[in-house]
Protein backbone atom coordinates (compact mmCIF):
# COMPACT_ATOMS: atom_id res chain seq x y z
CA UNK A 1 0.00 0.00 0.00
CA UNK A 2 0.99 3.59 -0.62
CA UNK A 3 0.19 6.33 1.90
CA UNK A 4 -0.71 9.74 0.49
CA UNK A 5 -1.20 13.01 2.34
CA UNK A 6 -2.42 16.37 1.07
CA UNK A 7 -1.74 19.67 2.82
CA UNK A 8 -5.19 20.89 1.80
CA UNK A 9 -4.76 24.45 3.11
CA UNK A 10 -1.99 25.00 0.56
CA UNK A 11 -4.04 23.66 -2.37
CA UNK A 12 -4.80 26.18 -5.14
CA UNK A 13 -7.38 23.97 -6.89
CA UNK A 14 -5.36 23.73 -10.10
CA UNK A 15 -6.70 20.23 -10.84
CA UNK A 16 -3.32 18.64 -11.61
CA UNK A 17 -3.81 15.84 -9.07
CA UNK A 18 -7.33 14.81 -10.01
CA UNK A 19 -6.33 15.12 -13.66
CA UNK A 20 -3.33 12.82 -13.11
CA UNK A 21 -5.00 10.30 -10.82
CA UNK A 22 -8.79 10.80 -10.95
CA UNK A 23 -9.63 7.55 -9.15
CA UNK A 24 -7.73 8.70 -6.06
CA UNK A 25 -8.07 12.51 -5.96
CA UNK A 26 -11.25 14.58 -6.14
CA UNK A 27 -12.18 18.23 -5.92
CA UNK A 28 -14.06 19.02 -2.71
CA UNK A 29 -17.33 20.69 -3.77
CA UNK A 30 -17.42 22.80 -0.59
CA UNK A 31 -13.99 24.47 -0.72
CA UNK A 32 -12.59 23.51 -4.15
CA UNK A 33 -9.45 21.95 -2.65
CA UNK A 34 -8.17 18.52 -3.49
CA UNK A 35 -9.20 15.60 -1.30
CA UNK A 36 -8.75 11.84 -1.21
CA UNK A 37 -11.64 9.91 -2.77
CA UNK A 38 -13.83 8.42 -0.03
CA UNK A 39 -12.98 4.83 -0.96
CA UNK A 40 -9.28 5.38 -0.12
CA UNK A 41 -9.48 7.66 2.95
CA UNK A 42 -7.79 6.66 6.19
CA UNK A 43 -10.21 7.08 9.12
CA UNK A 44 -12.47 9.26 6.95
CA UNK A 45 -9.84 12.01 6.62
CA UNK A 46 -10.06 14.15 3.48
CA UNK A 47 -6.29 14.70 3.49
CA UNK A 48 -4.92 11.19 4.07
CA UNK A 49 -5.36 8.00 2.10
CA UNK A 50 -4.08 4.54 1.39
CA UNK A 51 -3.74 3.49 -2.25
CA UNK A 52 -3.09 0.13 -3.89
CA UNK A 53 0.32 -0.29 -5.50
CA UNK A 54 -1.14 -0.09 -9.02
CA UNK A 55 -1.69 3.66 -8.42
CA UNK A 56 2.04 4.28 -7.89
CA UNK A 57 2.61 5.83 -11.32
CA UNK A 58 -0.37 8.20 -11.36
CA UNK A 59 0.22 9.22 -7.71
CA UNK A 60 3.83 10.04 -8.53
CA UNK A 61 2.65 12.10 -11.52
CA UNK A 62 0.19 13.97 -9.30
CA UNK A 63 2.87 14.70 -6.71
CA UNK A 64 5.30 15.95 -9.38
CA UNK A 65 2.65 18.03 -11.17
CA UNK A 66 1.41 19.85 -8.06
CA UNK A 67 2.69 23.44 -8.36
CA UNK A 68 2.31 24.02 -4.60
CA UNK A 69 4.00 20.72 -3.62
CA UNK A 70 1.24 19.85 -1.12
CA UNK A 71 1.01 16.15 -2.04
CA UNK A 72 3.24 13.60 -0.32
CA UNK A 73 3.40 10.03 -1.60
CA UNK A 74 5.19 7.33 0.40
CA UNK A 75 6.99 4.51 -1.39
CA UNK A 76 4.96 1.29 -1.62
CA UNK A 77 5.17 -0.70 1.62
CA UNK A 78 5.66 -4.48 1.52
CA UNK A 79 2.72 -6.54 2.64
CA UNK A 80 3.26 -9.29 5.20
CA UNK A 81 -0.08 -11.04 4.86
Image: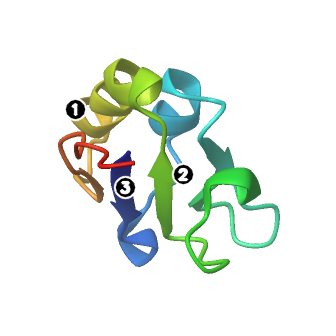
Q: 1 or 39, which is in the foreground? A: 1
Q: 29 or 77, which is in the foreground? A: 77
Badge 3: how crowded within 10 Å, few (<14), some, or many (20+)?
A: many
Residue 13 is tagged as 2
Q: What residue does disc 3 label?
A: 4
Q: Is residue 27 above or below residue 64?
A: below
At x 54%, y 51%, the residue is 13
Secondary structure of the residue carrying numbered label 1: helix
Whole-angstrom CA distance, mark 2 to mark 3, is: 17 Å
Mark nearer the viewer, 2 or 1: 1
Q: Earlier in the sequence, mark 2 or mark 1?
A: 2
Secondary structure of the residue carrying numbered label 3: strand
Q: Earlier in the sequence, mark 1 or mark 3?
A: 3
- Mark 2 vs 1: CB contact within 8 A: no
The percent position of residue 23, horizontal first and vertical second, equals 66, 32
Q: How is the image coloured?
A: rainbow
Whole-angstrom CA distance, mark 2 to mark 1, is: 15 Å
If the image is split into quadrants, where does the N terminus sit?
top left
Residue 58, image quadrant: top left
Badge 1: how crowded within 10 Å, few (<14), some, or many (20+)?
A: some
Residue 64 is tagged as 1
Q: Is residue 75 above or below residue 29?
A: above
The percent position of residue 36, horizontal first and vertical second, equals 59, 56
Outermost residue on the left side: it is 75
> In the shown orientation, is residue 19 left or right of residue 10?
right
At x 28%, y 39%, the residue is 63
Amino acid sequence: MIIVTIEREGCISCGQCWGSCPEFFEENPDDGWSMVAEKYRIAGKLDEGSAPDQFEECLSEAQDACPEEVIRVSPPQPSFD
